[in-house]
Image (spheres, coloured by chain):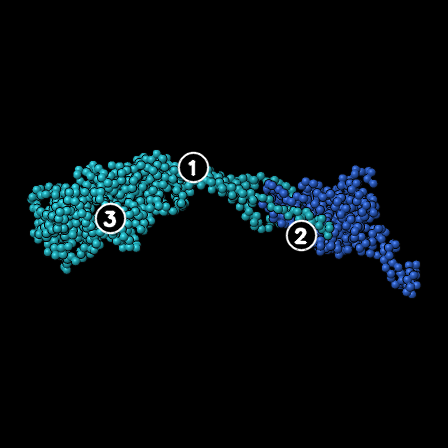
Amino acid sequence: MFSDRQPRRFLDPQVLSRLAAVPLVPRKPMVGTVSGRHASPHRGSSVEFAEYRKYVPGDDLRRLDWRAYGRSDRFYVKEYEADTNLRLCLVLDTSGSMAFSAAGPAKIDYARRVCGALAYLASQQGDAVGISCAADGIVRTLPPRRNPTHLRLVFDVLEEAVPAGPTRLPEVLHEIAETIRQRALVVVVSDLFVEPAALGQAFSHLRFRRHDVALFHLLDPQEIGFRFQRPTRFLDMEGGGAIFADPVDIADRYHRAVAQYLDAVRQLVLESGIDYHRVLTDEPYEQLLARFLVGRAAGRGLR
Amino acid sequence: MTFLQPWVLAALPLVALPLVIHLINQRRFQTMPWAAMMFLASARALSRGYSRLRHWLIMILRMAAVAAVILAVGRPLSRGWLALAGGGRPDTAVVILDRSPSMLQRGSGDEAKLDAGRRRLAATLTTLAPNRCVLVADAERPPLELARPADLADEAGSPPHAAPADILRMLQLAYDHVRENAAGSTEVWICSDQRSNDWALDAGGWGSLRDAFAKLPQQVRFQLLADPLPAAGNVAVRVTSARLETRGAGRDLLVTVAVSRQEEATRVTLPLKFEIGGATTVVNLELAGRDAVLKNHAIPLERSAATPGWGRVSLPADENPADNEFYFAFDEPAARRALVVAEDPAARRVLELVAGIPPDKNERALADVVDLASLVGAAWDEAAVLLWQADLPTGRDAELVAAFVARGGQAIFFPPEAPTPGRSFAGLEWGAWTGHAPPARPQSWRNDQGLLANTLSGGALPLGDLEIRRSCALSGDGVPLATLADGVPLVVRAAGQDNAYFCATTPAPRDSSLAAEGVVLYALVQRAVDRGLEPLGRARQIDAGSAALPLAAAGPWSRLAGPADAASGAFGLHAGVFSAGGKLVAVNRPAAEDAGRIVADDRIDATFRGLSFTRIAPGGAGAADSLVQEIWRAFLIAMLVALVGEGLLSLPRRVREAAVSGFPAAEAAA
């Protein structure tokens, strides 16, 4: 698959092989273009029974259930679930703040691993994968495709993503909600340094469009702990002004602000019903994805 | 606050060290790219509240710790509110001890005020450790330099005096010492019970002394260790007269004893103990009010008893042992001789009568009428009083009269019919006559002391009944003893000569009713005779102090009774009986000591206004012996407390990160 190129730095074959044991399934019925392994909102010809429906002229007589006719002297048509493929839309935050790293991996590197693994897993089970890089707007985008060549392009986008500029994630999500034509699994990987209220509207928009939204909220441990000893001049990585502060003096208020923000985000995800995962970048991404995949597999069959 | 090492306080600017370090630390900032700027912005927008307070508290505690260390090294002294006086270790400490009899009054702890003051001063000065410690023990001797302050508590020659303490004179001695020895910063410690007779604030000299101290180049601080609390139950005894009277084959000693106390209390019976020639008798005296008098108590003496003799009367011990005994000396009564010089026959006759009639039938009174021309031949050495109604003496006559007055004779001058202008004696001269119609009456007179004082029974002389028809003006420096309306002087004592009196009218009937109302004139003359007899007799009663010291030095005296540890040079300061050349002198405390008048605090404050002056109440500096104590330990403890507080406030606060980082797992489980 990657014979003509160097292995991608953000892909670990061993991790991928372990994660491949658990399928990536959406929490909602998907609308795909071809037959696949995921539930569809339409009736189809799979082996999984869905419901009986009264015969109406024009229905295929071969789908009449003669046994039901024998029992009830009425014509019923037996309908089955339709299986379709999954359209996985990855939304990667490439704003400047994603480049932050105190000790462990940078948030953008962590996001690359998460997105790369999910893209690979989806592609392996025949699902379409697309990606959008969000910063000041949609920096780069690839629509969902199913072929392996497209997966390489997705990996290229991941590899070439450079964190820069401010975050306009809500606007990007609104745009994505409008541009994805059919139901899809939208996976957002971001540090969410935006106002929770604006973010809530964007998630509501996605939900309104019947997309299944999963959100990976990346935070660096230093951003939570805020452990500094000396007065520090903090430079905004997204191009804003600098702030001078004595961490000893401001730490308690910083922690209060962080707690308020996280409470607001928590309230937001509870209201919008998205699949939310808060991640510290010192946590192994394999553990995170395993938790993500197993959680979804446990709820499979919901439509 | 006072410090033994005040130069250490120069390091006090180091208190700002934590602040400087903080500011330097602020400049040593690091620069860091930061992603979560929204949290920082939110944190800055949040109220600083407790955080800001904590920040300042930490800074204040650090500065307080540094300050406490510096102050502790400076060896601070606790002086109560004395701390306001400020200053460091004095170069010289001058101690002025009030050793008057009232200082023997026992205060709390059954310790005399004098002993308590000495002990506390010794402890205080030991702590202060001045370079030199000087004791002004009395007003008659130069200041004594002590080897070490502790000697103050047990210094030799410190028996209590019977003489009042002349605080003014002692302060002058202290001033002279400070000025002559070019002392550095000086502390003058005065230990006194604020008796008015010791302080004599009405005397001249206080103002000039205050100015002199204020002009000294070195810093002089005054500390008054005052203990003016009077003794409620204290009783003082005093012999007002002791005379011999022949009675048949024997003789009686008639002693008049007065006892007094400062506050009225319940009736008590006082056993008066008389000791004469080894024999002791006890007489009970009832004391109901504040005063009681045992008048002419007769003590029989053998006819062969030697004269002059002496005795002692004493009371049981009470709060002040110094006024519980009184010495007296007695002798055969001398003739009450008076010299009468009068140009007006009417006045001469009256004066001759009042001087020639003895107050007691056992005494002899002689009135020698002397012409101006034969003054030289008069019995000046035997006369007790001179009654002069003529132009004031000049030339040789004036010398005779001045010598008479100087040796203790009493002179009473009455105005002549035509005074010669410009002729004066003892600083006073007669002016013009003034007639009074209707006759003037004396409006006020000194009834507490002097020739016009109340009688022993407390009754006033009937001066108000006198009619003054003519009076002669007086000019010069004198102390009025009696005045007419509008302050016109009637009886004046010369300011420069205590034994010279001037009466502004004559006893002639045309001038006054002194002859008709003879009691006043008789009392005046006979009291003057009594005073004049004192230096003539072989037995004298004198007050301790400045009056007795010259006599003691001229004597010399040998002690018959009194404190055994008194130095011979200070006999005049101690109560006792002394003999010199066949004469006996009984020295006792002055009557003012028994009055117990206290000088008000504000008067003393006003006297020291402009100087650094602090008063220390008896319990004002605490119960400790020393009035000052080193309190560096307290500052070290304060430093420790400040450091502990700073440490507690600087502890890192519990971060809410735990709740934050634990959230994902909890949510995943949900």
Question: From where the camera sits, is residue A180 visible?
Answer: no
Q: Which of marks 2 and 1 is in front?
A: 1
> Considering the image in quadrants, where does the N terminus of chain A appear?
top right
Q: Residue at x 14, y 49 (%)?
A: B247
Please name the residue that numbered disc 2 is placed on: A263
Q: How far apart are marks 2 and 1 (CA)?
A: 61 Å
Rendering quarter of residue B497:
top left
Which subunit holds the residue at mark 3?
B
Q: In this view, does B404 lie to the left or right of B217?
A: left
Amino acid at the residue labelled 3: Val
Q: Residue at x 19, y 41 (%)?
A: B584
Apparent colour of chain B? cyan
How far from the left and from the top, in percent, is residue B480? 20, 51
How far from the left and from the top, in percent, is residue A232? 60, 42
Q: What element carries label 3?
A: strand
Which subunit holds the residue at mark 2?
A
Q: Identify the mark at residue B5; answer none if there is no mark.
A: 1
Q: Nearer the viewer, mark 3 or mark 1?
A: 3
Which subunit holds the residue at mark 1?
B
Amino acid at the residue labelled 1: Gln
**Could you classify mark 3 by the number of other residues whose Cα lies within 10 Å: few (under 14), some (14-19), or many (20 or more)?**
some
How far from the left and from the top, in percent, is residue B189? 34, 41
Q: Which residue is drawn at 26% across and 37% down?
A: B567
Apparent colour of chain A? blue
Q: What element carries label 2?
A: helix
Q: Which of marks 2 and 3 is in front?
A: 3
Q: What element carries label 1?
A: loop
Q: As displayed, is residue B313 above or below residue B8?
A: below
Q: How far apart are marks 3 and 1 (CA)?
A: 62 Å
Q: As displayed, is residue A130 above or below residue B183?
A: below
Please name the residue that numbered disc 3 is placed on: B282
